[in-house]
Amino acid sequence: MFNRVKGVFSSTVYIQLWEDRIKIAHVELQSVFEEQPYIAIDNKEKKKPTVMAVGNAAYRLLGSSRYEVLNPFSHPRLLVNDFEEAERVLQYGIREVCKAKLFQSSPVVVIHPHEKLDGGLTDIECRVFRELALGAGARKAYLHTGNEIPLVGFSLSSVNEPEKI
């Protein structure tokens, strides 16, 4: 009985990261947020910059003199360039896929980087991805490397944690 009640309130979110796109899927609801990972920030307020747009809406603001538009997942060596803004993009995407639930609890997140994995991930890179997921609202974070996990029949036992180098 406890597991049935727990299933109503718990959720699993699968995040796939590329430099030019992000795909966030709610496993149980099958809702998907798939957009470019841009964020537009209004820096007029010196104390606290305001997020004006995320994803494709932010990308459309590129070139605007009013907003700073950036891709926090674009860097020559790593997949994460700006940790704080990357966390904001993930927060937004998780909220988008979880908003259909009546009661929102912190989801279990599987984060899956698809690029810039040559030679494996260092402990620091693994920590960056886990901290991103936790900072974005995850109750628990898993890091997956390898092939994409299909949403149909998704199981945490399919998660392939990276080997430490």
Image: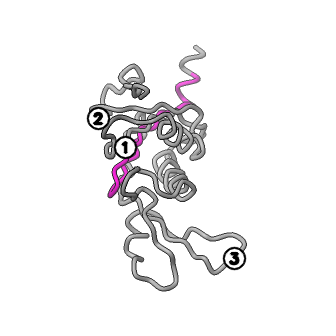
Whether the residues at callouts 1 and 2 have beta carbons within 8 Å, the answer is yes
Whether the residues at callouts 1 and 3 have beta carbons within 8 Å, the answer is no
CA separation in Å, label 1 and label 2: 8 Å
Q: Disc number at residue 81?
A: none
Region rendered in magenta: 5-25
Task: Name which of mark 3 and mark 2 comes first in the sequence.
Answer: 3
Helix or strand or loop: what does disc 1 sit on? strand
Callout 2, which amino acid? Glu
Please say if 129 is above or below 51.
above
From the top left corner, tell me how far across and down residue 159 is, in percent.
38, 25
Callout 1, which amino acid? Gln
Q: Which residue is mark 2?
A: 148
Q: Quadrant of residue 29?
A: top left
Q: Which residue is mark 3?
A: 46
Q: Residue shown at 50%/45% (left/top)?
A: 98
Helix or strand or loop: what does disc 3 sit on? loop
**Is 21 inside the magenta-drawn segment?**
yes
Q: Disc number at residue 16?
A: 1
From the top left corner, tell me how far across and down residue 86 is, in percent.
50, 55
CA separation in Å, label 3 and label 2: 41 Å
Task: Name which of mark 1 and mark 2 comes first in the sequence.
Answer: 1
Q: Quadrant of residue 35?
A: bottom left
